[in-house]
Image: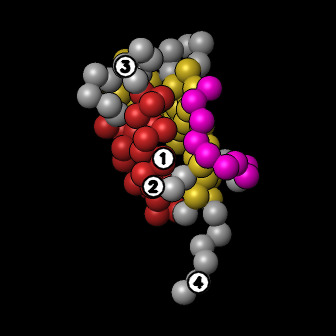
Amino acid sequence: MARHKPAARRWFVRGRVQGVGFRYFAQHAASTLGLTGYARNLDDGRVEVYAAGPEEKLSEMAGMLHRGPRWSDVRGVEEQEASVETRGSFDIR
């Protein structure tokens, strides 16, 4: 079985995404999928999520971020290719 080259993505999520557990939701989703990275609140009200891992798991993560946790109201998700950073876990910043 071929090993897949790790990939990375950065997402900027807008809507009602701060103060609703979005970063913890992202951390749980990433842990479930075996991805590393981080989630952090931005000053403009968005949440930035960075994740690295297999391409198919990043696609699953993107789908989860579009839905968000129960109390959130995701209005848009901007996705960017990102360089792969070696991290041991998925952190909340």
Is 25 left or right of 49, judged from the image as shown? left
Give how far across and how far down residue 10 sits, in percent.
59, 41
Numbered disc 3: secondary structure: loop
Tell me the CA gap for discs 1 and 3. Answer: 17 Å
Reply yes or no: does residue 90 show up in magenta. Answer: yes
Q: Give the label on residue 71, or none.
A: none
In what quadrant of the picture does the N terminus appear? bottom right
Residue where numbered disc 2 is placed: 33
Reply yes or no: does residue 65 show up in magenta. Answer: no
Within 10 Å of the Cα at label 3, are there few (<14), some (14-19), or many (20+) other Cα atoms?
Answer: some
Residue where numbered disc 1 is placed: 30
Tell me the CA gap for discs 2 and 3. Answer: 21 Å
Marks 2 and 3 close (CB-CB < 8 Å): no
Give how far across and how far down residue 26 sits, in percent.
45, 37
- Of the two numbered discs 4 and 3 on the same chain, state the one appearing first in sequence: 4
Within 10 Å of the Cα at label 2, are there few (<14), some (14-19), or many (20+) other Cα atoms?
Answer: some
Q: With respect to residue 58, does 56 lie above or below?
A: below
Q: Which residues are magenta?
A: 85-93
Please state which amino acid type lies under the numbered disc 3.
Answer: Val
Residue 50 figure quarter: top right
Out of 92 and 75, give the one closest to the viewer. Answer: 92
- Of the two numbered discs 1 and 3 on the same chain, state the one appearing first in sequence: 3
Residue where numbered disc 3 is placed: 20
Q: Would residue 15 be seen by someone viewing this image from the given angle?
A: no
Numbered disc 4: secondary structure: loop
Please state which amino acid type lies under the numbered disc 4.
Answer: Ala
In what quadrant of the picture does the C terminus appear? top right
- Residue sitting at x 44%, y 24%: 14
